[in-house]
Image (cartoon, helix red, strand yellow):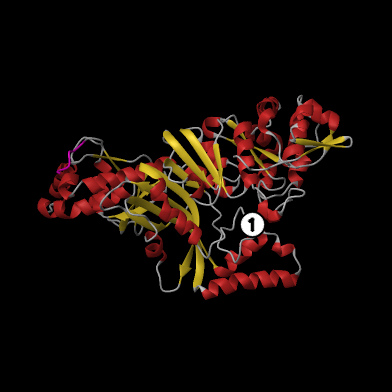
Amino acid sequence: MAGVQTPHLPAPDSAPALRDDLRAAAFTADGCLDLLGAVAYAALSRAETVPALRATRGDSPLDTLVRLFLLQRPVPYERARAALPGLERYAADGWLLRDGEDVRATVDVRPYAGDGGADWWIVSDLGCAVGGAGGIGSAPGVDRADLVLGVGGASTTLAGLTVREPVGSALDLGTGSGVQALHAAQHATRVTATDVNPRALHFARLTLALSGAHEPDLRRGSLFEPVGDDRYDLIVSNPPFVISPGSRFTYRDGGMGGDDLCRTLVQQAADHLNDGGWCQLLANWQHTEGQDWRERLSGWVPQGCDAWIVQREVQDVAQYAELWLRDGGDHRSDPATYTARYDAWLDDFERAKVSGVGFGWITLRKSGADAPVITAEEWPHPVEQPLGPHIAAWFARQDFLRRHDDADLLEARFTLSDEVVQEQVGLPGAEDPEHVVLRSARGMRRATKVDTVGAGFAGVCDGTLPAGRIVDAIAQLLGDDPVVLRDRTPGSIRMLVEQGFLEPVPDAVNPRP
């Protein structure tokens, strides 16, 4: 991080001692939840502090630390010293500031529930743990464009999506306060974190130091420029994906036209992945007139990569502009300024013939396959987090299906996935259902309509019999021609495997070369 000047931010040297004091006072995610209660704790995530102020009227060390670091209120010096035995050192290192008879925090320090129940802390600018630059406050003397946000909904979503396999190297591109780098440090031997904002790099260093992670390799620059030709086993990114006119805020506006930043990141990812490596990111993308968004985004995927693109939400251009105008605090400006900025957003969308903006996630895996699998789908329904294991399983199932032709599938063995139930839909009292639905409570929580054969096949898959034997038994039971049933069943098997209702039994069949 040579050449990066951050004179107004805390030094990380005292982070280990501060971590011990925070833990001793139960200033952890669980401790704060116990003190504040669910209502006040949830209100904090909406940048509402009144319930938490009411819940911290006591004088315990935890009350003091919540007011100091989460609510960013001054606390009496003696109370601060009782909660933080190392107070003088933390003040000397810039974590705290003496203000007459009171003490104030210089940064937001927010407890975060880490992997495996670990206690972590995310360090960000004052008032910017949630709510964007238009949230509950801002760091004194810091340009709003350079503010560094803490952990929010997008951060936790990406953390839950990420495949957590042991890897040699990981890259957190656009690290911000270092949330993704902190997660990656738990399963990667080497972590590199980049950002265009030098303040963000320093905050990432503070976050990892305070949470007890090993020192990351911090590099300043945009996209892949800081890493040159380096390659990684895992690339994660919560980039500045907002499609905006201009680049007002470093943390959200990518400075490229439209969704070019996300497109460029995806297109260049393969050049920085080791074979078998993963790239996972959150993104916004434009819905343009006359072009299906699925085809458009599928065209971003680099050669030799499998991809799974999931659209979680679509907003019309007015909704989208209003969301980010509020994020930037423009709703608090004078009406003329607000109107001018709103017009600028709509002008840009009109010129580009954009009707809406999609939000979701993109996962790439550098498979090197001659016939890569690229799936783009819309899925606005609730999912089960963490999704990382389910995403890894989805790609593994694509490998299986790619290696097995129809004949191989009939020789393979399968098991019904956990927590799959069958629903029969029809009129009350009818002898036969109108249709049968398989529904999963895991992962993407999918539901799919199947016929009687598909439902019967899935119900008896316990890994003991080859699929073909099961099909023959169903044909005999129904009085159908087994040859005809064998011809049409592999398509249903592929669908059930791809969507995760059936799991192949490992080494159950050796596919023909």
- Please say whether residue 70 is visible from this viewpoint: yes
The front one of 78 and 5 is 5
Instruction: Decide: is 355 above or below 468.
Output: below
The region drawn magenta spans 508-513
Snapshot quadrant of residue 84:
top right
The front one of 501 and 118 is 118
Quadrant in the picture for the C terminus: top left
Counting from the top left corner in percent of width and height, residue 283 is at 50, 55
Counting from the top left corner in percent of width and height, residue 109 is at 68, 38
Q: Residue at x 38, y 41 (%)?
A: 419
In this rendering, position of residue 294 left or right of residue 513: right
Quadrant in the picture for the N terminus: top right
Instruction: Decide: is 24 above or below 32.
Output: above
Identify the secondary structure beneath mark 1: loop
Q: Amino acid at mark 1?
A: Phe
In this rendering, position of residue 219 left or right of residue 421: right
Q: Residue at x 76, y 47 (%)?
A: 50
Residue 511 within the magenta-colored segment of the rendering: yes
In this rendering, position of residue 385 left or right of residue 467: right
Q: Main secondary structure of the magenta part?
A: loop
Residue sitting at the far front = 3
For label 1, count other residues whose C-alpha is less than 10 Å away and answer few (under 14), some (14-19) or many (20+). many
* Tag 1 residue: 249
The front one of 120 and 99 is 99
Q: Residue at x 77, y 31 (%)?
A: 92
How many marks overall? 1
Counting from the top left corner in percent of width and height, residue 480 is at 13, 53
- Please say whether residue 387 is visible from this viewpoint: no
Counting from the top left corner in percent of width and height, residue 470 is at 18, 43
